Image (spheres, rainbow, N blue to C red):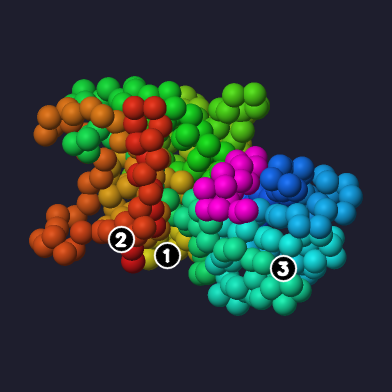
């Protein structure tokens, strides 16, 4: 007889399957599905990339036969009820026959579709159990959730800090504040986001590559790597910085303001490397940047930068999501580098809040994540 603990166990497996599509499914969500017969998993599937079979259809194909009467399907996201490129998954589940129970994690975030898949399945006589590990399943797809509800890219800030909110010592030493498990999880994020951004200060001090290094996989690079440099400080290091010279250099974009003037020699050096320059409207800087990302079909940007850029993004109310990796360390040094540096707050009520925060333990460290309230 089904019970909550059993349903959660199978759903956790579906979540693990969904994560196999990390970074490959945009603009679609990551989804995992499995089929259970007589209490045992008999088939599994996940959405691999846009245009390929959805997770439910992949699981049915992996089964290779009609499900036995009384079979169950577990899926991390409400089965789609629209045909799209691959056909409605509700139709596939009903047509397969045998499936009498569908257990779902998150409801479709699209207000136009939310709950319709449940209605269709129930009308066909299938028992539907929604909301199993709903928060976990919803957090699989922050980019998709943002795009489907607002039509705009997700801006997420990421930082690794001590318990007292410091990211480096006063001398600049920061490797490593967090442990190996937390750093590996950052690679997961880099693999997930289609664009990663940093500031000129971080580029000059740390010379980051902003690539994803996942064990067992080739080094991967996001579709775009942004370097925010309003004062054009990085131009003095065009020939040295990895972002301007590695094998992925043509994916690097220098972001500055329309008032900034890139010297002709530097402009030629950037152009020779295939590096674009986005000169944004200074008065509508973040709105302009979000519009440019939308036009470039970049559904999400992960900001890995210093306190000034991250704090400015939050203070401007342009940040949508936060990933804060917190290590059980205390610097107790007011001169050490803070995680965020924004405008001073006059009242506690002015503080930015994180909605529905989630905490995940990663070795000795913790990941605190959630949506930043508007």
Q: Which residue is mark 2?
A: 316
Residue contact between numbered discs 1 and 2, judged by CB atoms under 8 Å: no
Residue drawn at x 40%, y 32% is 362
Choose top left, top right, bottom left or bottom right for residue 66. bottom right
Q: Which residue is mark 1?
A: 287
Q: Is residue 141 visible?
A: no
N-terminal label among 1 and 3: 3
Spatial CA span between label 1 and label 2: 10 Å
Rendered location of residue 59, percent (x, y): 77, 49
Q: Which contiguous range is marked in magenta?
A: 1-25
Spatial CA span between label 3 and label 2: 48 Å
Q: Is residue 290 visible?
A: yes
Rendered location of residue 183, percent (x, y): 43, 29
Please identify the dominant SS of the magenta region.
Answer: helix
Choose top left, top right, bottom left or bottom right for residue 57. bottom right
Is residue 305 or residue 268 the one in the foreground? 305
Spatial CA span between label 1 and label 3: 45 Å
Is residue 192 or residue 264 the one in the foreground? 192
User: Callout 2: helix, strand or loop?
Assistant: loop
Is residue 220 or residue 132 the one in the foreground? 132
User: Callout 1: helix, strand or loop?
Assistant: helix
**Other-residue count near label 3 (Cα within 10 Å), few / some / many at <14 / 14–19 / ≥20:** many
Q: Which residue is mark 3?
A: 126
Rendered location of residue 287, percent (x, y): 42, 64
Choose top left, top right, bottom left or bottom right for residue 320. bottom left
Rendered location of residue 11, percent (x, y): 59, 48
Residue drawn at x 52%, y 69% is 149
User: Callout 3: helix, strand or loop?
Assistant: loop
């Amino acid at each position: 007889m089904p019970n909550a603990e059993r349903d959660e166990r199978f759903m956790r497996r579906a979540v693990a399957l969904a994560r196999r599509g990390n970074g490959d499914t945009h603009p679609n969500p990551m989804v995992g599905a499995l089929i259970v017969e007589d209490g045992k998993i008999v088939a599994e599937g996940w959405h691999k990339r846009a245009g390929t079979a959805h997770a439910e259809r992949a699981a049915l194909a992996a089964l290779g036969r009609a499900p036995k009467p009384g079979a169950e399907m577990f899926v991390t996201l409400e089965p789609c009820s629209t045909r799209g490129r691959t056909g409605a998954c509700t139709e596939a589940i009903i047509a397969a026959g045998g499936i009498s129970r569908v257990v779902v994690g998150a409801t479709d975030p699209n207000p136009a579709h939310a709950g319709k898949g449940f209605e269709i399945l129930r009308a066909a006589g299938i028992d539907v159990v929604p909301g199993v590990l709903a928060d976990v399943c919803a957090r699989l797809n922050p980019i998709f959730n943002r795009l489907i509800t607002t039509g705009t890219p997700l801006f997420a800030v990421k930082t690794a800090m001590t318990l007292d909110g410091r990211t480096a010592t006063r001398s600049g030493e920061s490797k490593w504040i967090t442990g190996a498990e937390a750093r590996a999880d950052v690679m997961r994020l880099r693999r997930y986001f289609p664009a990663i951004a940093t500031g000129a200060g971080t580029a000059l001090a740390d010379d980051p590559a902003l690539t994803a290094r996942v064990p067992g996989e080739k080094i991967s690079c996001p579709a775009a790597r942004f370097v925010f440099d309003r004062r054009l400080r990085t131009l003095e290091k065009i020939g040295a910085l990895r972002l301007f010279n590695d094998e992925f250099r043509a994916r690097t974009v220098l972001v500055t303001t329309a008032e900034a003037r890139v010297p002709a020699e530097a402009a030629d050096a950037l152009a020779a490397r295939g590096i674009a320059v986005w000169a944004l409207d200074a008065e509508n800087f973040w709105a302009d940047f979000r519009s440019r990302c939308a036009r470039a079909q970049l559904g999400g940007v992960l900001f890995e930068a210093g306190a000034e850029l991250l704090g400015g993004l939050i203070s401007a109310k342009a940040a949508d999501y936060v990933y804060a990796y917190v290590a059980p360390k205390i610097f107790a040094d007011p001169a050490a580098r803070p995680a965020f540096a924004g405008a001073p707050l006059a009242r506690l009520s002015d503080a930015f809040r994180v909605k529905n925060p989630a905490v995940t333990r990663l070795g000795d460290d913790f990941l605190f994540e959630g949506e930043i309230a508007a």
